[in-house]
Image: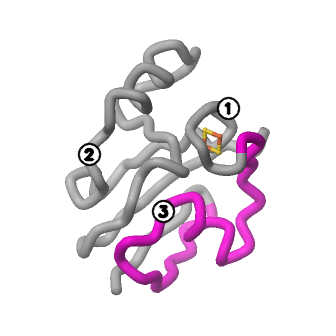
């Protein structure tokens, strides 16, 4: 079990470790898009991770390639569908499309 905080609301939720960020966000009612169904192909689940980056699963080459081709990314960017929560708390920000 771990916690994640969603910005800008600042709400914090408990979630099982091993859950993707996308599933965690959706499970608490955040209206994050996932046009490709979580397959890492659409970019709609882009989030910025401000705390706990090292607690997330490592970026795989396919996610890295996708991020490289996106506009508006930063060093904190992840695709929520590809990032799996670990044991440490995470804070993420996403912008409604
Ligand atoms: S849901 Fe499409 S890239 Fe994450």
Q: Earlier in the sequence, mark 1 or mark 3?
A: 3
Mark 2 → mark 3, Cα distance in angstroms: 12 Å
| Image coords of residue 47 (percent x, y) | 53, 44
- Per the image, the residue denoted by label 3 is 20
Which callout, 2 or 1, points at the residue further toward the start of the chain? 1
Q: Position of residue 83 (x, y in %)?
A: 41, 52
- Residue 34 within the segment the image draws in magenta: yes
Q: Residue furthest left?
A: 54
> SS of the residue at dot 2?
loop
Taking 27 as reference, is 89 left or right? left
Task: Reply yes or no: does residue 40 show up in magenta.
Answer: no
Instruction: Count neighbours of disc 2 (C-alpha within 10 A) and say few if under 14, some if 14 to 19, many if 20 or more.
Output: some
Q: CA distance from mark 1 to mark 3?
A: 16 Å
Earlier sequence position, callout 2 versus callout 3? 3
Tell me, for residue 58, which label it has, or none.
2
**Viewport quadrant of the C terminus:** top right
Q: 24 or 30, which is in the foreground? A: 24
User: Where's residue 75, x and y in %?
Assistant: 33, 29
Q: Which residue is mark 1?
A: 42
Secondary structure of the residue carrying numbered label 1: loop
Where disc 3 sits, the SS reads loop
Residue ID at (50%, 60%): 21
Q: What is the total number of numbered labels drawn onto the structure image? A: 3
Give the crowd class for mark 1: few <14, some 14-19, many >=20 residues within 10 Å: some
Magenta residues (range): 9-36
Q: Residue at x 69, y 37 (%)?
A: 44
- Going by the image, does 68 lie left or right of 29? left
Query: How crowded is the residue under tag 3: few (<14 C-alpha within 10 Å), some, or many (20+)?
Result: many
């Amino acid at each position: 079990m771990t916690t994640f905080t969603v910005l800008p609301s600042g709400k914090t939720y408990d979630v099982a470790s091993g859950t993707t960020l996308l599933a965690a966000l959706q499970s608490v009612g955040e209206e994050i898009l996932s046009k490709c169904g979580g397959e890492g192909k659409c970019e709609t689940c882009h989030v910025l991770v401000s705390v706990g980056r090292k607690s997330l699963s490592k970026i795989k080459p396919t996610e890295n390639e996708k991020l490289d081709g996106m506009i508006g990314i930063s060093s904190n960017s992840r695709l929520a569908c590809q990032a799996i929560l670990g044991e440490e708390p995470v804070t993420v920000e996403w912008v409604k499309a």
